[in-house]
């Protein structure tokens, strides 16, 4: 990881109420790379994306993007920085009252006053890049899950961002669509000269395109390295996650906070439960 | 014992509610002020005025017409015993302008437009559309919330004026052609007893206050709804119930202040 870092996280801590989500995360994401962030569901991966995008603020620690400390940015400056970021949401988050074309055109219309023919060309180029030029006139309700995800991808990159976040881009898609999205992520990252951060628990697809990966567990990074390094990792937790073993350091059984059976018997004895 | 539990509970509830009110007030203020944000769009505002105002017209006109007709019947029934049917025009006009117009307009608006507003904003939140907007560096308060709030605030007084007008016409149709009250007296009495600033403007001012409150509650409930299907449903119900009760309570306060 000698390359210049675009995103740097130093000892970032974040808690929801009394529940700690991130307990001191350090992470450096090099410019131009596709970086995968993996971990079990509910492990704080999406929270990390939101922290990097500035929609959440950490309780302590520092997050820098292109050298700018997010905590020190004013709201206006944060919005300015976000114009150089794109995000693909887990459920696409397309605007349901706008056509596919207008969804992709939305950021351009809001930020620039472009002549209609220029705007049209820019939007059509992005739709062409995701292979859905023909679907420009369709509404989100008329698109399949995979097509919706591709339109959302076109919208995420229409402003030519330097940093693209992908939140579970493969979840809920058929194998063909998964393959298409994976190759698009790779191609767009190269074509735009961007940096991509990919949150996923789909190990095979993610490793096929990622340059570097982090595994998050218990609010900390437990392993990092290239896909090959990670596969060879000696961390039991990393091996359990990558190998998809049902039991291991992450137990199959959810630990009970109290003995529910005993509590039920007590309540039964007290005549509360029939 | 029950009393002892009640006191800390009251305190806890108050402590929960007061900061919530503060946050909701900041939400209202920053939404209203985002009319100066570069992402505020007058095109959106006009579209929302059409959606909330123009498309509520039929409901308002029908409700106003029937309200006016019922007022005509009931007023006549009460006044004829004292031989005072000449005051029927005044009675109908004052009831509508001062109370029924603003209150019924606001209640109907809460049911027709407020519920739709809450459902729309909360489902945009549940499907991450608001987050997506924020990620595209477009402030959702300026693009989504502000045009809807302003549309509600502008629409309700206008709808109330139309409600008053149609209501009075409905009352006239029952009083004069059906019940045989003298038409000249009906209008003349109304003209001499209804004042522009004391009755008409204060009634419209009430409607303006209700417009702010109803759209504020609707937008706030939508914006803070839990992002689930159940959350959207709950928020919509709560929006109509809270807005209706607030309108009735606020009406009492405003009447006490304005007409005392």
Image (spheres, helix red, strand yellow):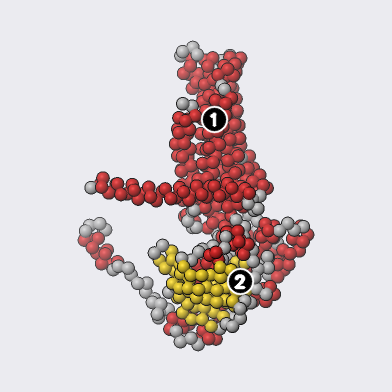
**Looking at this rendering, what residue extends furthest in the left direction?**
A269
> Where B175 falls versus A256 (above or below)?
above
Instruction: Classify residue A124 by image quadrant.
Output: bottom right
> Residue A206's spot in the image, x, y percent?
57, 78
Name the residue located 74 percent from the left edge and 60 percent from the top edge. A119
> Where A273 falls versus A252 (above or below)?
above
- Chain containing the residue with disc 2: A
Determine whether, in the image, residue B158 is placed left or right of residue B23: right
Number of residues whose C-alpha sits closer than 10 Å to that of mark 1, classed few (under 14), some (14–19) or many (20 or more): many
Name the residue located 59 percent from the left edge and 55 percent from the top edge. B140
Residue A176 seen in this snapshot: no
Please state which of residues B123 and B13 is positioned toward the viewer in this rendering: B13
Locate the C terminus of chain A by quadrant: bottom left
> Where A58 falls versus A176 (above or below)?
above
Residue designated by label 2? A66
Please state which of residues B200 and A177 is positioned toward the viewer in this rendering: B200
| Residue at mark 1 shares a chain with residue at mark 2 | no
Task: Please name which of the two marks, 1 or 2, marks the residue nearer to the observer.
Answer: 2
Residue B34 seen in this snapshot: yes
User: Residue B203 got which mark?
Assistant: 1
- Chain containing the residue with disc 1: B
> Residue A32's spot in the image, x, y percent?
63, 77
Please state which of residues A257 and A160 is positioned toward the viewer in this rendering: A160
Discs 1, 2 touching: Cβ within 8 Å: no
């Amino acid at each position: 990881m000698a390359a210049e870092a675009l995103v740097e996280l130093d000892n970032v801590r974040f808690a929801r109420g009394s529940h700690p989500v991130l307990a001191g995360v350090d992470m450096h994401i090099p410019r131009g790379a596709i970086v995968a962030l993996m971990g079990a569901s509910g492990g704080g991966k999406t929270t990390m994306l939101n922290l990097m995008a500035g929609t959440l603020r950490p309780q302590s620690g520092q997050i820098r993007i292109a050298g700018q400390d997010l905590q020190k940015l004013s709201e206006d400056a944060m919005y300015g920085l976000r114009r150089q970021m794109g995000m693909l949401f887990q459920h696409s988050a397309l605007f349901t009252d706008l056509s596919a074309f207008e969804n992709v055109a939305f950021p351009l219309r809001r930020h620039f006053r472009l002549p209609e023919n220029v705007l049209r060309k820019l939007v059509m180029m992005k739709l062409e890049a995701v292979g859905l030029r023909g679907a420009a006139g369709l509404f989100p309700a008329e698109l399949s899950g995979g097509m919706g995800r591709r339109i959302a991808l076109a919208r995420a990159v229409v402003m030519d961002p330097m940093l693209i976040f992908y939140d579970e881009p493969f979840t809920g898609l058929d194998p063909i669509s998964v393959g298409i999205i994976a190759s698009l992520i790779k191609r767009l990252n190269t074509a735009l000269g961007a940096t991509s951060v990919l949150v996923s628990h789909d190990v095979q697809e993610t490793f096929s395109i990622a340059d570097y990966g982090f595994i998050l567990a218990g609010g900390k990074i437990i392993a990092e390295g290239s896909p090959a390094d990670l596969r060879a990792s000696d961390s039991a937790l990393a091996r359990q996650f990558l190998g998809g073993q049902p039991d291991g350091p992450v137990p199959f059984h959810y630990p009970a906070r109290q003995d529910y059976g005993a509590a039920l018997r007590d309540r039964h004895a007290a005549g509360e439960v029939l | 014992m029950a009393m002892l539990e009640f006191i800390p509970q009251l305190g806890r509830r108050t402590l929960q509610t007061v900061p919530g009110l503060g946050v909701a007030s900041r939400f209202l203020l920053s939404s209203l002020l985002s009319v100066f944000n570069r992402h505020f769009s007058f095109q959106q505002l006009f579209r929302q005025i059409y959606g909330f105002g123009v498309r509520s017209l039929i409901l308002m006109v029908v409700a106003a017409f029937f309200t006016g007709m019922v007022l005509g019947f009931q007023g006549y029934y009460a006044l004829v015993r004292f031989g005072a049917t000449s005051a029927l025009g005044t009675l109908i006009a004052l009831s509508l302008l001062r109370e029924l117009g603003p209150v019924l307009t606001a209640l109907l608006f809460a049911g027709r437009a407020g519920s739709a507003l809450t459902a729309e904003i909360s489902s945009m939140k549940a499907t991450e559309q608001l987050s997506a907007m924020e990620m595209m560096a477009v402030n959702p308060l300026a693009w989504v919330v502000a045009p809807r709030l302003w549309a509600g605030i502008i629409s309700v007084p206008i709808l109330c004026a139309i409600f008053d007008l149609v209501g009075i016409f409905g009352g006239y149709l029952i009083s004069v052609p059906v019940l045989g009250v003298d038409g000249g007296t009906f209008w003349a009495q109304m003209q001499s007893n209804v004042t522009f600033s004391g009755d008409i403007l204060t009634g419209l001012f009430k409607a303006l206050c209700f417009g702010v409150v109803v759209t504020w509650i609707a937008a706030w409930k939508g914006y803070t709804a839990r992002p689930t299907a159940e959350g959207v449903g709950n928020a919509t119900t709560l929006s109509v119930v809270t807005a209706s009760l607030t309108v009735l309570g606020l009406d009492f306060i405003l009447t006490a202040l304005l007409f005392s």
